Amino acid sequence: MNAGSKAKGRVTMPLSRAELHTACLWAAASLACSVVCHAQDFPSRPIRLIVPQAPGGGTDILGRNVAQRLGEQLRQPAVVENRVGAGSLVGTEYVARASADGYTLLVGRPGKLTYGSAGIGTLQHVWGTILFRSLGLDVLHVPFKGAAAAHQEMMAGRLDMMFDNMSASKQYVQSGRLKGLAVSSASRSGHLPEVPTVSETGLVKFEAESWFGLFAPAGTPAPVVEILRKALTDIIGDPEFAARIERDGGRVLAIPPQQQQQFMREQIERWTKLVTQYGVTVD
């Protein structure tokens, strides 16, 4: 699991919060403005309330209720504008980059942590939801079209954290561009020996490793399956291939044919139970 970091190893806050100088609105409908408005004629034009979520949701309804009363109080129209995308990052970043004059406000929940994934239903999404809900944390899931896009958002400071495979993320941690918080394996990784396991943090017991295999369609002739199986057995038994996998942060897992079905059943049962227990959905 990674988080954006500064040169000194401290976790960076995303631009939408660390540099948000315009006003923010939270659930209690109270208003906090970090910019002192010196103009005596403020407001002299309509105020925009940016809702980073789709119309009809709780945040949108709250925003419209507040906009009506705000317009009445300030005697200027207060207009709600929905800017959706990437969870709530599109609208939040839009406000963060707006002129700090009090005319563009964000309707949202300041301080909410975000975690990214390569898309809804991916390993990053499922593991992240299970882990954070087991910790009792309300963390916003932000799905991307691939892990690379999420990495870029973290390094830009606009996303807090995500799970990802060692092979794809270790280079960023080793270079100091991202901070490794924990690994999900039972023991520490030789590539990042200073990063503890999730269980070592003492916060929660969580152990998981992603694995990969090759699958053929049902009904594939047995002789064909046997040829493929023998070829793959030779590949994973090759020391050079195993060394390449280890350099990328993984390890070769050779499961005898007679144990493969049992392994699959155990994996399906384990994750089905956790997905149900923690309410992971693809909505």
Image (tube, helix red, strand yellow):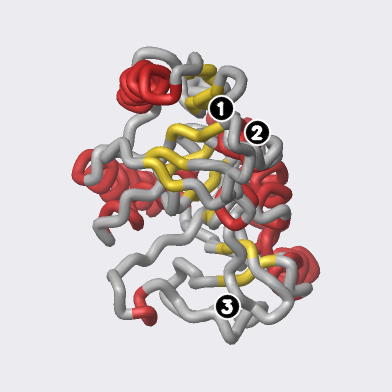
Q: Secondary structure at mark 3?
A: loop
- Mark 2 surroundings: few (<14), some (14-19) or many (≥20) residues within 10 A: some
The image shows residue 76, relative to residue 246, as above or below, that is above
Q: Secondary structure at mark 2?
A: helix
As drawn, is 88 to the left or to the right of 62? right
Q: Position of residue 250 (x, y in %)?
A: 63, 65
Relative to the observer, which residue lies in front, 99 or 94?
Answer: 99
Q: Give whichever of discs 2 and 1 has the lower sequence position.
A: 1
Relative to the observer, which residue lies in front, 109 or 158?
Answer: 109
Q: Position of residue 165 (x, y in %)?
A: 60, 57
Relative to the observer, which residue lies in front, 211 or 199?
Answer: 199
Q: Give whichever of discs 2 and 3 has the lower sequence position.
A: 2
Position of the C terminus by quadrant: top left
Q: Secondary structure at mark 1?
A: loop
Pointer 2: what residue? 94
Does the CB distance between marks 2 and 1 fall below 8 Å?
A: no
What residue is at 57 percent from the left and 37 percent from the top?
92
Pointer 1: what residue? 43
What residue is at 76 percent from the left and 64 percent from the top?
241
- Mark 1 surroundings: few (<14), some (14-19) or many (≥20) residues within 10 A: some
Q: Quadrant of residue 107?
A: top left
Q: Indicate which label's residue lies in the foreground, 2 or 3.
A: 2
State the CA–CA distance, disc 2 to disc 3: 39 Å
Pointer 3: what residue? 189
What residue is at 53 percent from the left and 26 percent from the top?
50
